[in-house]
Image (cartoon, rainbow, N blue to C red):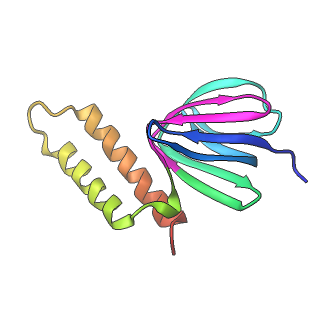
Amino acid sequence: MAKTFLLEVVTPERAVFSEDVSSIVIPAHEGYLGVLAGHAPMLCTLKPGDIAVRGEHGEQHFATSGGFVEITPKRVIVLSESAERTTDIDIPRAREARQRAHDRLHAAEKGTDRERAQAALDRADNRVRLAEKYGKK
């Protein structure tokens, strides 16, 4: 049996996931990072992307909006503004949010914070992409 470690995915609203897992792949700011039990301690930032988790229940995926991760040999904690299982994403609603973000970014109204609008579009694109790839069939 593969060695395991505790993975906790936490948002300001709730604990999204807390289980022993055998591996994860996370969207670190400089690229995707794989983690196994016994990993060297580190802290890093996350960008919007896919948290891929392998454990007793097979492979699971979570859409994250970015955040921070703390890695120790026996535990990984992901702190994110938002994170959700890809199977829980309402695809039509996510597409609507993506369209709103796209419209806001491209409206070019005076006073629009383009960086913030682009970040919202990136998050919405990520949710739609992952829901369509790993969500409910």
Asked if 28 appears above or below 62 in the picture, the reply is above
Across and down, in percent, residue 70 comes to 64, 28
Q: Nearer the viewer, residue 83 or 118?
A: 83
Q: Residue at x 63, y 58 (%)?
A: 60
Q: Residue 96 is drawn in which quadrant?
A: bottom left
How many marks are shown on the rendered structure? 0
Q: Nearer the viewer, residue 104 or 106?
A: 104
Left or right for 108, reference 53 = left
- Work out which residue is located at the far left of the displayed protein and give it: 110
Query: Any magenta on residue 91?
Result: no
The segment highlighted magenta reads 63-83
Across and down, in percent, residue 106 comes to 18, 46
Q: Residue at x 55, y 52 (%)?
A: 62
Across and down, in percent, residue 75 comes to 73, 34
Left or right for 65, reference 45 = left
Asked if 41 appears above or below 135 in the picture, the reply is above
Q: Main secondary structure of the magenta part?
A: strand
Q: Residue at x 13, y 40 (%)?
A: 108
Q: Residue 118 is drawn in which quadrant?
A: top left
Q: Residue at x 22, y 52 (%)?
A: 100
- Work out which residue is located at the far top of the displayed protein and give it: 42
